[in-house]
Image (tube, grey):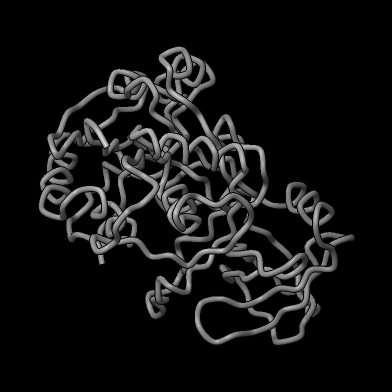
Amino acid sequence: MGIPFNLPEKLHANVPPEHRFGRRDGVRMMVLEDGEVKHAQFFELGSFLQEGDVIVFNDSRTLPAELEGVTEKGEKMVVRLARRMDDKKWAVIVAEGIAENGETIWFSKSLSAIMEKNAGAYDHLSFSKGGTELLNDIYQIGVPIRYEYIHDPWPLEAYQTVYSSVPGSVEMTSAGRAFTWKMLFELETLGVQLAYLTLHTGISDLLTENWSPNPYENWEEYTIPKKTADTVNKALKEGRRVIAVGTTVVRALESAFDTEVKYGKGSTNLYISSQTNLQAVHGLLTGFHEPEASHLDMLCAFVSEERLDKAYKVALQEEYLWHEFGDVNLIVGVGQ
C-alpha cells in the first residue's frame, strides 16, 4: 500500500504552527490542480476555489485518549483508546504495563475498567461508566496521544480544529486544523458553501511491527446530517464541486452514497484506492501522509499514482512538513 519514500527527520512537524509563527492558517499548501503542482500559503485557499463549491468538514472533537491507571496488583498501566465498541466498551492499545484477562484497572477513584485480552493488536476495556459520564471522566484524566516526533506535551486544544464540536476521535482530524474562523467566514463571502458531518477517527499507530490489520477491519462511526446530505446532493445535481476536508470526510460521504448521499448514522469499513470510482467527492484537502500509509492509496482515487509520486518528490524537495502540525495538500480539478 502507498508509495515508497524516505521521510527525513527534519520534515516531522513537532510544534503547532501558531507557536512557530503566530497563526494556524500560515502553513504552506501544495496544490495539485488537474495534476499540476503549485505552491501557496494555506490562507490563500480561496483563490483555488470556485463560487458554488461545497467544502465538507468533519466536526469530530478529539478526546485525550491516553489514560494512565493502576491494576489490582498495583502496577502502572497506560492505555490508548483505539475505537469505541459500544456505550461502555472500547478497543484499546496497551502502551505500558500488563493486565490479565478479567483484571480491573483503576483510572481514578470513580472510574475503573475490566480488561478483556484479545489476539492481535487490540484489547478491550469495559468501563464502569458509559455515555457522557465516561467522556467527562476521560476529559478529566486523559492526555492527548502524542507520538515520538512530538517532543513537548501540547495542551488538548492544540489537537482540535476550531469547528470541532462532537467528542469521539482518538486522534485529531488534522486536515482541517489550519482553518481559522476568519478563513471560514471569508470562504462563505466568496460563495463557497460549508457543510459538516461527523466521523470519529480511530488510532493510527498500533505500537507493534508484528501486526498489520486488514484495512477492511478499520470500522469507524459516522453521522451525516440531513442539511449536509441535501447540500451535497444539490451540488452534485448542478455539477458543482464537492471538496472533502480530510480522508475521513471522503470515507463518510462515499460510504453513504447510493444514488445520492443518504443522511443518518452508519459505520464504515470502506477502503478507497485507485480502483474506486468516487461518486460524491471531487476534491480533497489533506495533510501529507507517511510512506506506505493506506491514505496514500485513497489519494490515488483523485490523482494517478504516477502524478502523486512526482508531487510527493516535489514536497520532499520543497521541505513541506508532515503530520498534524504540518503543511497541507489540496487536490482538485478545475471542474467536475
Across and down, in percent, residue 247 comes to: 40, 50
Q: Which quadrant of the figure has residue 28?
A: top left
Image location (x, y in percent) of residue 128: 84, 68
What residue is shown at x 50% (from left), y 38% (from top)?
A: 57
Taking 241 as reference, is 151 above or below it? below
Judge left or right: residue 255 versus residue 135. left
Between residues 98 and 222, which one lies in front from this camera angle? 222
Split into 4 quadrants, where in the image is the N terminus? bottom left
Question: In the figure, residue 243 lies in which quadrant?
Answer: top left
Q: Quadrant of the C terminus?
A: top left
Q: Nearer the viewer, residue 294 or 144?
A: 294
| Residue 36 higher or lower than 295, as above or below | above
- Quick check: can you spot residue 24? yes
Which quadrant of the view contains residue 6?
A: bottom left
Q: Is residue 73 left or right of residue 81?
A: right
Q: Vertically, is 170 above or below 315? A: below
Question: Residue at (10%, 46%) from the top-left corner?
Answer: 310
Q: Is residue 159 visible?
A: no
Q: Is residue 67 left or right of residue 325?
A: right
